[in-house]
Amino acid sequence: MSDLNPQTRHIADQLESPLKLAVFSWPSLLLIVSIALFILNTFMSPYFLSAWSLSDATFNFTEKAIIAFAMALLIISGEIDLSVAAIIALSSTIMGLCLQLGFGTSELVLVGLFVGVLCGAFNGTLVVGLGLPSIVVTIGTMSFFRGISFIILGDKAFNGYPAEFAFFGQGYVWWVISFEFVLFLVVALAYFVLLHKTNFGRQIFVIGNNATAAQFSGVRVKRIKFILFCLVGLMSGVAAVLLTSRLGSTRPSIAQGWELEVITMVVLGGISILGGSGTIQGVFIAAFIMGLISFGLGLLNIPGIVMSIFIGALLIFVIALPIIAGKLKSRLKA
């Protein structure tokens, strides 16, 4: 490279930079970690490499990841939704009520999706319409939505869902490939295109970096944020349908603690908690990492509370890592 003149060297550097960015990017690092975890799990349990075991492993992350893709867009825009698990509980509860009224499978699915969108729109109205902080609003609606579920059901449960309804959470499209996993791939592709290949996605990044400047540039900030809250609600409704179908019952405590796992998945995927940056590819790989970790711990019969501790520690580490790295970089420059 030293024999090249400055202009040629500059062109060569430009050609190399996309490759360098790809190799040293956060998603590439996550991919290496996921491969390492996969290899580690094969040594920890002789049952891990079974086709059916790998298929079962996908159920540990697909429902949460479907919400995480929408949550990623919302966090990039500078907002957050902590009520996603409560939306799942309320959607599932209303589906259970409709089941008692004789609703069929297609009607139950539509009810679950509608309740999810309605909850998302409620959050969006409070945040966008009234200008309230999203973290405060969604902490409130987290208790509000789940509280309604407990009022309706108490310590009871709704059972007796139609046999056709079980397909969404328990069915297989081909051999060991579950319907949930196929839906996860379709949703991932849809959100990749939406965020990285459309003008709507570019506007989300602009809003996350500087909402005021975006507003003066003609971007409809409030409208886009409201749509994003509705999308998170819709994906929570989808997860409610899948989870209720997989469990075959409805309880008000359903999906408890999922909001932490969803946000951990998003932040681990490289989405800045401060907004303005991140990729769907990173969230996609982070979903597999979370699934591999939880399934590996399950094969070793490690209690669920250990998983909760690990997820909490992982979330703190991932949020703190760029801040610590930035301070170290500043000190080295100084």
Image (cartoon, grey):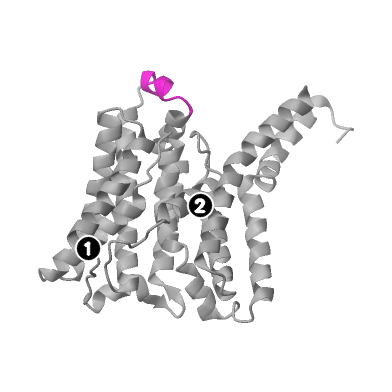
User: Mark 1 highlights which residue?
Assistant: 154
How many residues crowd mark 2 within 10 Å: few (<14), some (14–19), many (20+)? Answer: many
Residue 217 in view (yes/no): yes
Rendered-image quadrant of the C terminus: top right
Q: Looking at the picture, how far across and down is residue 86, in whole percent?
A: 31, 53
Label 1 residue SS:
loop
Q: Residues within 10 Å of mark 1 (few under 14, many from 20)?
A: few
Towards the viewer: 88 or 72: 88
Asked which secondary structure carries label 2, the reply is helix
Q: Earlier in the sequence, mark 1 or mark 2?
A: 1
The quarter in which the N terminus is drawn is top right
- Checking the image for residue 163, the label placed there is none
Residue type at the position of mark 1: Gly
Q: Which residue is mark 2?
A: 265
Query: Picture coordinates of residue 133 (x, y %)?
Result: 35, 31
Q: Residue visible at 24% across and 70% down?
A: 157
Residue at (52%, 36%) from the top-left corner?
277
**Of all residues shown, which one is farthest toward the front?**
155
- Tell me how far mark 1 sits from mark 2, CA to CA: 31 Å
Task: Kindly indicate the quadrant of the structure image that contains residue 203.
Answer: top left
Q: Is 216 above or below relative to 136?
A: above
Q: Is residue 157 left or right of residue 253?
A: left
Which amino acid, mark 2? Met
Q: Is residue 42 magenta?
A: no
Which circle, 1 or 2, is nearer the viewer?
1
Residue 218 on image: x %, y %: 35, 22
- Asked whether 214 falls inside the magenta stretch, the response is yes
In the picture as drawn, the residue positioned furthest to the right comes out as 3
> What residue do we see at 58% from left, 69% from top?
297
Residue 313, placed above or below residue 132 = below
What residue span does the magenta drawing correspond to? 209-217
